[in-house]
């Protein structure tokens, strides 16, 4: 069954009717379930002004879904396929970026730090002051000073992969500890 | 002597530039990249190949073995 051209007419009839019973009566039986749900919304919104327009948009989307032709379905499926491919590409790019960051981090760690990271998920860094920090996997609140057990939150302004973040934290603690402590939020 | 520079970015993770210190065009390209990211607020570190400890770089050094450019740090 096709409803092309009907939905606006029915909508206008429906929303201009004076009683709830009349509204439901004018809806074709095939639309009854959705119409009843929508009718409750419209009744509560008094079907006026922008609110009615908002519900009309919802109604139109539902009606168009029912009316979808083979051609429309093909267009929709092509668009969905493009979106899904973009999602897969993005996930693959993120995975590649993450893998590169892991390799870079490992190349900049000592043997001991690499062993720590692979076995317990963190590595320790000694600052020029003598303080030792534990850098855990992650981006935020992942740096702990070993003596006081204070947690520091300081990371690159850009959302780089976690391994890049950990390397940036390591390098800053090793070379500019005071600046790191000045920037970091402490808890 | 070859040098390597890794630049951390959001879209690509890090990308690398390798130069031969005896080839002026490669050194020039590496220096331009270094200066471009430094101008954006990136922090530059020189690290040894073993990765034991970094050193802050104020300007490009053609003889550096390994350079890391990291985005500006902020408190979280």
Image (cartoon, rainbow, N blue to C red):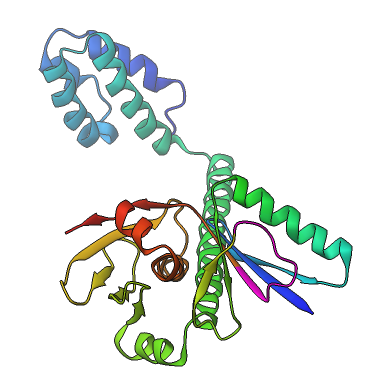
Find residue B17 and report its horizontal and vertical position in percent.
72, 67
Residue at (53%, 81%) from the top-left corner? B51
Find residue A8 and report its horizontal and vertical position in percent.
38, 17
Residue at (41%, 38%) from the top-left corner? A65
Tell me if residue B76 can be seen. no
Question: As displayed, is residue A92 above or below residue A108?
Answer: above
Which quadrant holds the N terminus of chain A?
top left
Find residue A48 and report its horizontal and vertical position in percent.
22, 9
Find residue A54 and report its horizontal and vertical position in percent.
30, 21
Residue at (33%, 57%) from the top-left corner? A154
> Which one is nearer the viewer's eye here, A156 or B9?
A156
Residue at (34%, 73%) from the top-left corner? A137
- Rendered image quadrant of residue A62: top left
> Which one is nearer the viewer's eye here, A101 or B50?
B50
Query: Does residue A72 appear to the left or right of B34 in the view shown?
Result: left
Q: Which range of residues does the magenta coloring cover? A: B58-67
Query: Does residue B10 appear to the left or right of A118 in the view shown?
Result: right
């Amino acid at each position: 069954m096709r409803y092309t051209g009907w939905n606006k007419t029915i909508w206008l009839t429906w929303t201009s009717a004076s009683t709830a019973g009349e509204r439901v009566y004018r809806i074709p039986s095939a639309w009854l379930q959705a119409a009843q749900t929508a009718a409750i919304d419209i009744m509560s919104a008094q079907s006026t002004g922008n609110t009615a327009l908002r519900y009309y948009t919802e109604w139109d989307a539902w009606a168009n879904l029912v009316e979808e032709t083979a051609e429309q379905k093909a267009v929709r499926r092509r668009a969905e396929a493009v979106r899904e491919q973009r999602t897969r590409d993005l996930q693959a790019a993120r995975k590649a970026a993450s893998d590169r960051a892991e390799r870079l981090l490992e190349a900049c760690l000592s043997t001991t730090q690499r062993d720590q990271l692979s076995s317990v998920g963190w590595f320790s860094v000694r600052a020029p002051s003598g303080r030792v920090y534990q850098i855990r996997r992650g981006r935020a609140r992942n740096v702990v000073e070993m003596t006081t057990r204070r947690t520091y939150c300081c990371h690159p302004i850009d959302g780089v992969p976690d391994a890049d973040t950990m390397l940036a934290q390591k390098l800053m603690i090793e070379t500019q500890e005071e600046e790191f402590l000045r920037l970091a939020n402490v808890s | 002597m070859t040098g390597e520079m890794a630049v951390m970015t959001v879209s690509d993770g890090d990308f690398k530039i390798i130069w031969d210190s005896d080839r002026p065009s490669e050194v020039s390209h590496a220096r331009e990249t270094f200066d471009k990211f430094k101008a954006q607020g990136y922090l530059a570190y020189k690290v040894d190949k073993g990765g034991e400890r970094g050193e802050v770089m104020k300007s490009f050094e053609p003889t550096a073995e390994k350079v890391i450019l990291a985005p500006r740090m902020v408190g979280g």
